[in-house]
Image (cartoon, grey):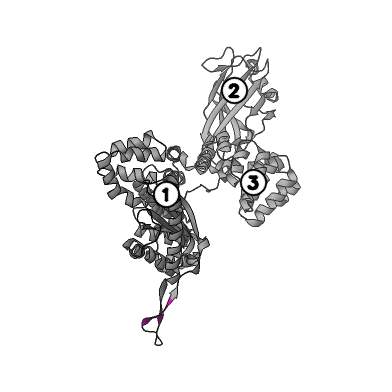
Amino acid sequence: MKKQSIKSLSILGLAAIGIAGCNGFSKMLKNANLIHYSVTPNPLQDNGDSVAVNITAQYPAKYFAKKAAVTVTPTLKLSDGSEVALKSVNLVGDKAKGEGQKVSYDQGGSISYTAKVPFANAMKKDELDVKATLTNNKKDFPGVKIADGTIATALLIQNDDKVIAAKDNFVKTIPEHDTTRIFYVISQSNVRPAEMKSEEMKKFKDFVDMGTQQNFTWEGIDVDAYASPDGETDMNQHLADDRAKTAIKAMMETFKNMKMDVEKANKKGKEHEVLEKLPIDAKLGEEDFYKVVHTGLDWDGFKTLVQNSSIADKDLIIRVLTMYNDHDQRMKEIKNMSKTYVELANDILPKLRRAIIIINAEKKGRSDAQLTALSASHPDSLSVEELLYAATLTTDMNQKLSIYKSAEKMYGNDWRCANNAGYAEMALNKLSDADADFQQADRLSPNNPAVQNNLGVVSRWKGDRKGAMAYYNKATAAGPDVSYNMGLVDIQTGNYADAATSTGSFNTFNASLAKVLNNDAAGAKSTLDASNDQSAISYYLRAVISVRSNDKEGAVANLKTAINKDASLRAMAQSDCEFLKYKDDAEFKSAIQ
């Protein structure tokens, strides 16, 4: 606050009335207006739950009597009528008896005084007086006012701590796929009927049937076709291409002829019977639904099968593959291992003569409306991801809490359920319940940054700022919300520069407040304007910002709006020393009456 010089005030070092004039005491009293006092800041200011008092008294030359001894006691006179006496200081003249700070008669002197006192609400409309006692004869002197009130703007802080809810992993569409294979005879590309009746193919068809009933969206079918490495390169490439074509043709025919059973209630509606067999999605039988991805010689598949086999010379075979890149040279070297080649021909190569068919689809999850309804009526039918997601679909914190509690009951080992229940409980001011849930989340996921942050918020709300900071220091990996929460503690502890930095990336009431306290009125205004906060307390803070910007009209207008929104702010404004400079202004007085 602005440093204000207070002149013509008596006391610090005044001699008592009635002391003999020859000692100079009466002269000190008569010339008390020559003493210059300053109090910084003036008005006083709450800073981290304490009020610092800094007084400077300047005594002119030829003023302080040589034998004078004075005990000076700055005193806060509170609005409730009580007084708080601060530490005393002893001042002595050049020839005075006793100990104390000397004030020269010939040269005068400057006395600096500092003290700190715990803040109390009654200080908002107090005054700082100075009292003195002439120790020579124990006579007291009336107190003299040297400063007005105490600014407590930091107390405007709002509980908008950033509690972190754990994210769900719910996806509205789930990728699905299935794979089958068609194996071929050496040097042939025709599909044998038995291949279309294999157990693998039956399971593939069952997948398509199931997907059709569950309304899968079919995305496409990929086909890879291969020839075994034995044989001439160009011939094998053509053979692989042909196998891709025959595989596609076989699958198209299969899907064109494939029917799905559809059930329908009989006329009485009490039983179900198969009404008819309906075809599956027609596009599965269309050629442009298929894409050939890879064809050729499957050396990678050959290497994998050899590595996983029990062939005695498999290391030698792998070495050949490493030494030679040319296909024909590789096969020549491998065929030279006559006994080993027989094993390859019987156990490895037939598995490479194949087409691989991969069908890709998307499974649609339940709709938002379905999830909302089920989370209330049958939460046990939903997965943990569906429940956590369903809670995000409502803005009603009681509904959120109900869903999170259901999730916590059914999926008690998932830390997110307890954490998010605590998140909702904090929003509902259920501090004890939130604390218990966050503690449970911490047991399930020790040192989790999000949980540590939330435990820090609980600690701050309980008044344990040191504990809150300890949690926040372990939570920094949780992101910028943690920094913001640290800024709120900094506001309360009077570290205003740190508070402004920690909250600087946010446009909130508290971020603006931090800038006000750090003497950045312009930045505070920009932040508050960007927040779009239209609450009564935000207009009150705008009035404070206006005063600090020497904008009386803005202060009056914003105070009127604040009081219109919340009449209780009228009494706050009447005792707020932020507005002290306008206390006698008619427009201002009209605004707060």
**Nearest-to-viewer mark from 2 and 3:** 3
Tell me if 546 is positioned left or right of 216 in this view. right
Mark 2 or mark 1: name the one nearer the start of the chain: 2
Q: Magenta stretch: residue 220 in it?
A: no
Which quadrant, please, contains the N terminus? Answer: top right
Tell me the element at label 1: helix
Q: Which residue is mark 2?
A: 112
**Nearest-to-viewer mark from 1 and 3:** 1
Q: Which residue is mark 3?
A: 528
Q: What is the C-alpha distance between the residues marked 1 and 3? A: 73 Å
Q: Magenta stretch: residue 276 in it?
A: yes
User: Which quadrant of the structure image shows residue 417?
Assistant: bottom left
Q: Position of residue 174 (x, y in %)?
A: 45, 58
Q: Is residue 253 above or below residue 304?
A: below
Q: Is residue 238 above or below residue 327?
A: below
Mark 2 or mark 3: name the one nearer the start of the chain: 2
Q: Which residues are magenta?
A: 264-277
Q: What is the C-alpha distance between the residues marked 2 and 1? A: 100 Å
Q: Which residue is mark 1?
A: 236
Tell me if 350 is positioned left or right of 515 in this view. left
Q: Amino acid at mark 3?
A: Leu
